[in-house]
Amino acid sequence: MKKSQRIQRLAAIAVMALMSWTLLAQQPTSSASFEVASVKLARPATAQVWQITGGPGTPTPSRFIAANAPLSSLLFRAFGLQAHQLDRAASLEDVRYDITATVPDGSTRMQVGAMLQKLLTDRLRLRTHFEERQVPGYELTIAKSGLKMTTAEAIAIPISGAASSEAGPPKFTTGPDGVPELAAGRPMWVARAVGNAMSIVGRVQSMGSLIKLLEQRVGYPIADLTALAGTYDFKLLFEPDRRPLLVAGDDPQFAVKDSEPAPDLAGALESQLGLHLRAVKRSAAVLVVDGYNRTPTPN
């Protein structure tokens, strides 16, 4: 089998795995529901400020609150979607809702998503379906210059150290350049602004973890074609808004000059980690809104 055919086969497998996981995660649990919930149309306001707060992993795990939240944002939260997974043919930004709900004890974030799906279905008569569509995406391969990340293994942490680490967020120091410095052998990552640039530093991280971090930056799925196993240490410094990322079909050479300490993300991946990010068209499960009632049924 030729190398290009192997890469295409790996890409197809990655797409199928991504779609299978996405569809499974998006299936609501029929029995999952908020204990008490209020859904109201938000009052017309000139301000576009909105928020969705509360639930598992927050300071208020038993309360879910949406204030002036667009329906699109509620759908992202309910179905666990990325930006490319929602069909915006219908106007989902203009209609906004205020929601206050009580979350059952011990609920997970995914379960709260299923509860929100059920709430929107019951109160708005929301009707949706998923379609497989071609959307922008990326492929990540090892650059021609070779991999520049360092392999790393986790070290054993004494019981006393483990107990103290759970008392609060992971601690790290900051180097002279403002970039976080992490202890060796401790699996963790930190993303932090450094002036006009952004740094992402990781210790003992898998390629899957790195790709999730990158997908948060680019907003589209990334297929891992590196075939890299194990865990790595990396330090990435880039300027988010210096220039846009690739467009589908482009395959430029990323020449990063010494005078550019903070290149764009694609250039930083190439020069600092030895990874090549290429834009492609790929399949994804996209949520389509078939209809809904603008005015919710009474609480």
Image (tube, rainbow, N blue to C red):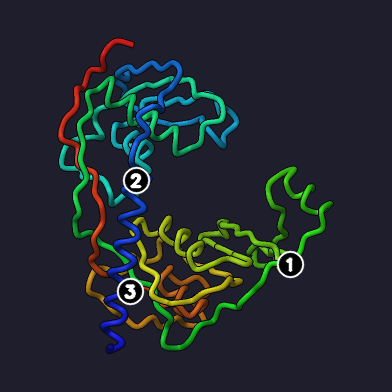
Label 1 with label 2: CB-CB less than 8 Å: no
Disc sitting over residue 52 in the figure: none
Residue that numbered label 1 is attached to: 155
Circle 3 packing at 10 Å, graded few (<14), some (14-19), many (20+), is: some
Relative placement, left or right, of 38 versus 268 is left
Give the vertical position of 274 relative to 116 (above or below): below
Give the vertical position of 22 relative to 153 (above or below): above
- Among all residues in the image, which is located at the extreme top? 298
Q: Determine the image quadrant of residue 110.
A: top left
Relative placement, left or right, of 146 versus 283 is right
The residue that appears at 50% across and 64% down in the rendered structure is: 210
> Label 1 sits on what residue type?
Ile
Nearer-N-terminus badge (3/2): 3
Residue that numbered label 2 is attached to: 81
Observer-side mark, 3 or 2, equals: 3
Q: Secondary structure at mark 3?
A: helix
Foreground pick, 227 / 294: 227
Q: Give the distance between the C-alpha atoms of the residues marked 1 and 3, in whole angstroms.
A: 32 Å
Disc sitting over residue 10 in the figure: 3
The residue that appears at 40% across and 61% down in the rendered structure is: 241
- Among all residues in the image, which is located at the extreme front? 31
Circle 1 packing at 10 Å, graded few (<14), some (14-19), many (20+), is: few
- Among all residues in the image, which is located at the extreme right? 160
Name the spot of residue 298 as percent of width and height, x first: 29, 10
Q: Give the distance between the C-alpha atoms of the residues marked 3 and 2, in whole angstroms.
A: 24 Å
Q: Quadrant of the C terminus?
A: top left
Nearer-N-terminus badge (1/2): 2
Q: Secondary structure at mark 2?
A: loop
The residue that appears at 39% across and 27% down in the rendered structure is: 31
Name the spot of residue 144 as percent of width and height, x first: 41, 88
